[in-house]
Amino acid sequence: MTTFSSDRTFGVEFEAFNVDRRTLVSELRSVGIRAEMAYYSGSNFNLWQIKTDGSINGPQGFEVVSPVLRGDAGLAEVEKVLEVMNRLDAKVNRSCGFHVHWGVGDWGVKQFRNVSKRWMKFERSFDMIQPMSRRGNTNQYLQNFNSFNSLEVAFQKVDACRTVTEISHQFQGGMGGRYKKLNFKKFNVTGTVEFRHHSGTTDFAKVKAWLLLTNSMVADADSNKSIKRWAQATDAQTALKVLLNAAVRTGGIDAATRKFYTRRARQLVL
């Protein structure tokens, strides 16, 4: 099994419906998962919180928010939670999302510039491995991080920022700005960067692949590798190939995960 290339902490959020929250808490506890019911604003990240979520279209909508997790032990805990959700017949639809937080409390503006540029360079490619409801600006709760038509201009805007707050303000705006595919709004509170792009899922294979790919993005920003604009016009499919090959080369994902995303991109073609 591919392991995470860093020892950074992470957290996950699963949006779903069709399961009573009290029942879910009880069943999670029965398999050794520390869980409790919580309101939307709950912030106890020492255990799994089962929250209400009014944005979900479906009966008995809920959100599962993990505690702070780490490494393969954390991944195994995620798998166990998903097993319980699936046993209880949890369902997802286009109103649901799966969000990942990576702990980056040690990052300075240099790393945030790096991950911003990487995301914007490959944003169209990330769209290719998500359903239509998660692409472009089709979803009000999931907007493109880059709002500039020119990648050159966007990179210049990033370089002009001196703090993560400035980057967040430039690319995410005010209060509603957290609804971006890449979200820095919680950094000053939780010390995390949030990847919000993925569609709702209870499929552990999809969850694991996304955790590996986003962790690869974080590891690349850690390494301070330079990120350059495309030297020539590059379509999203070619860019996706570049992204996945580079992630394999650096050890962020394995060949099986690259194959998984290559196949998924083909399956999601209109």
Image (cartoon, rainbow, N blue to C red):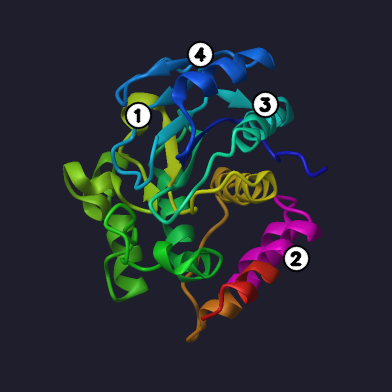
Identify the image quadrant of residue 181: bottom left
Tag nearer the camera, 1 or 2:
1
Q: CA distance from mark 4 to mark 3?
A: 13 Å
Of residues 29 and 231, which is closer to you in this image? Answer: 29
Amino acid at pointer 2:
Lys
**Number of other residues with Cα within 10 Å of mark 4, as a class: few under 14, some 14 to 19, many 20 or more:** few
Q: Which residue is mark 4?
A: 46
Q: Is residue 248 left or right of residue 243?
A: right
Residue 158: percent from the left, percent from the top? Answer: 32, 56
Position of 265 relative to 144 (above/below): below
Amino acid at pointer 1:
Thr
Amino acid at pointer 4:
Asn
Residue 77's tag is: 3
Tag nearer the camera, 3 or 2:
3
Nearer-N-terminus badge (1/4):
4
Identify the image quadrant of residue 267: bottom right
Q: Which residue is mark 2?
A: 259
Q: CA distance from mark 4 to mark 2?
A: 35 Å
Q: Which residue is mark 1?
A: 52
**Number of other residues with Cα within 10 Å of mark 2, as a class: few under 14, some 14 to 19, many 20 or more:** few
Residue 247 included in the magenta stretch of the image: yes
Identify the image quadrant of residue 149: bottom left
Residue 69: percent from the left, percent from the top? Answer: 59, 25
Residue 61 included in the magenta stretch of the image: no
Q: CA distance from mark 3 to mark 2?
A: 25 Å
Query: Who's the residue at 72% across and 25% down the image?
Result: 73
Query: Given the current orientation, which residue lies at the most extreme right position?
Result: 1
Write the start and end of the magenta stretch as one range.
240-261
